[in-house]
Structure formats: structure tokens, C-alpha cells
Image (cartoon, grey):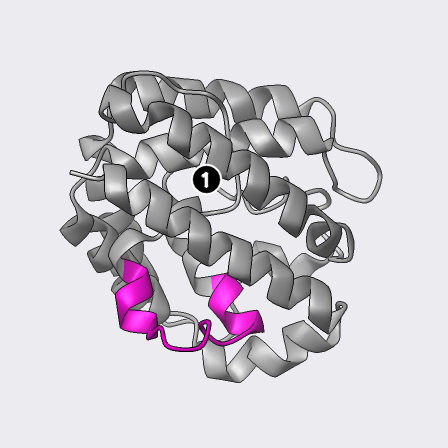
Amino acid sequence: MAKLLPGVVAMVAVVALCNLCLPAFVPPPAGQSLRRGVHMSTAVGAAAVLGAAPAAFADKIDDAAVKLSAASYPFLKEIDWTSPVYGSLPNANPVKVLAAINKALVMGASMDSAALKAGVLAHASAIGKIDAKGMIPLSDYQYINAAIGHMVASVPKSQVIDVYNAFSDVVKKEEVGEYMKSLVNSADAEAAYKAFWEFKDVVGAAQR
């Protein structure tokens, strides 16, 4: 792919992929296991979506998306989004890829329709603003993050875990983690992951 929207390949699969990629850069925060983290996988992206989660949590997800976006944007700017690596899965087993896509489709079918629509519109708007480096404005990144937060909050946790496990069987984090981290500023990667971990807790509190 010549240009790839940061953190986005498809509206459904992005949640699993981002949950897989971010831990590949840095380990979970001290005292937290990866298995605990995947109970609420979210991704890089946003858009104020109402109705996807209980009203009491709606603003919390949006607020958390603002914090996540600000903390991780420097990290995103360091990534070469024009690299062909994001358009392929080296050494991936086709059967496992299909199985992972199937799990993602099942999760996507369970998403709140209003949340899914808002997420699609947020991504569509951002795609029109991609620059030569494959980056989008911070404001659009924030909208996408919020949108994905509401999308994930609208599905059962068990389905998110199923998607995470399926994609982790396709791309092994231990095989790419150190290499990917070597391409960016280590401190920025760690700050992004810390913010991501906090964001998943907020979304997880709203998840059904």
C-alpha cells in the first residue's frame, strides 16, 4: 500500500491489529499482564460516537481518546506509514489469516450500528487529509480513536479476546517487536503504549 491511514487497514480488523502491534513495541506496564490487557483491546483511532456505550461512559471514552491521541501522536509521526510492510504479513499462514479475519468479521457484526457508522465516517474524513508521509491531522486521529473506543465498547469482551488471539497466531510479536521499536524513538513508543493501556481500561469499563 502506497499510503496507509495510521493504525487502520479495515474498520473491523484494526482493533485486533493495533492491539497486537502496540505490545510488540513495548511490554505491558509494570504489574499488568498481557492477558489482563486483552480483556479490553482497543486501537489507535477516535470519533465522538453516542449510543455505542452506556451514557454514563460516553464522555469518558471521548476524554480518554483525547489523552491517548496527544500521548501517542509523536510516536505515530515517527513511523514510516508508506512502508510496504503494512500491506503484507510476511510468512503468514493463509489458513490462520482467514481464521483471524473470520473472528474479526464476527466481532464487526456485533458492533453497534451507529458506532460502526461513525467510525467509518471518521476514517473516511481522515483519509482525505493524509499527507505525503501517510499521516493525518491530530484532530482526525483523535476522532478515530474515540470512534474505535465506542465500537469496541459495544461488543462482548469475549469476542475481542477471540480476535486478539486469532491475530496473535498470525503475527508473532516476539519476532518483530525489537525490530519495529528500533525504527522509532523508544521513549515515544513507551509513552504511546502507556496511554493505550489507560485507554483500554476506560473502554473496558463501558464494555458489555
Q: Is residue 152 left or right of residue 42?
A: left
Q: Residue at x 42, y 58 (%)?
A: 19
Q: What secondary structure is found at the residue carrying circle 1?
A: loop
- Residues 172 and 206: in front is 206
Picture layout, residue 37 above or below residue 49: below
Could you say where residue 175 lies in the image, as x and y percent from the top left? Answer: 52, 83
Look at label 1 and name its amino acid: Ala
Could you say where residue 48 lies in the image, as x and y percent from the top left? Answer: 46, 21
Q: Is residue 165 left or right of residue 134?
A: left
Is 120 covered by the magenta stretch?
no
Q: Residue at x 52, y 72 (%)?
A: 24
Q: Is residue 173 visible?
A: yes
Quarter-of-image position of residue 87: bottom right
Could you say where residue 170 lies in the image, as x and y percent from the top left? Answer: 37, 69
Instruction: Identify the image quadrant of the C terminus.
Output: top left
Q: Residue at x 44, y 77 (%)?
A: 30
Q: Which residues are magenta?
A: 21-38
Q: Is residue 45 left or right of residue 184?
A: left
Could you say where residue 123 lies in the image, as x and y percent from the top left? Answer: 55, 27
The residue identified by callout 1 is 10
Picture layout, residue 59 above or below residue 134: above
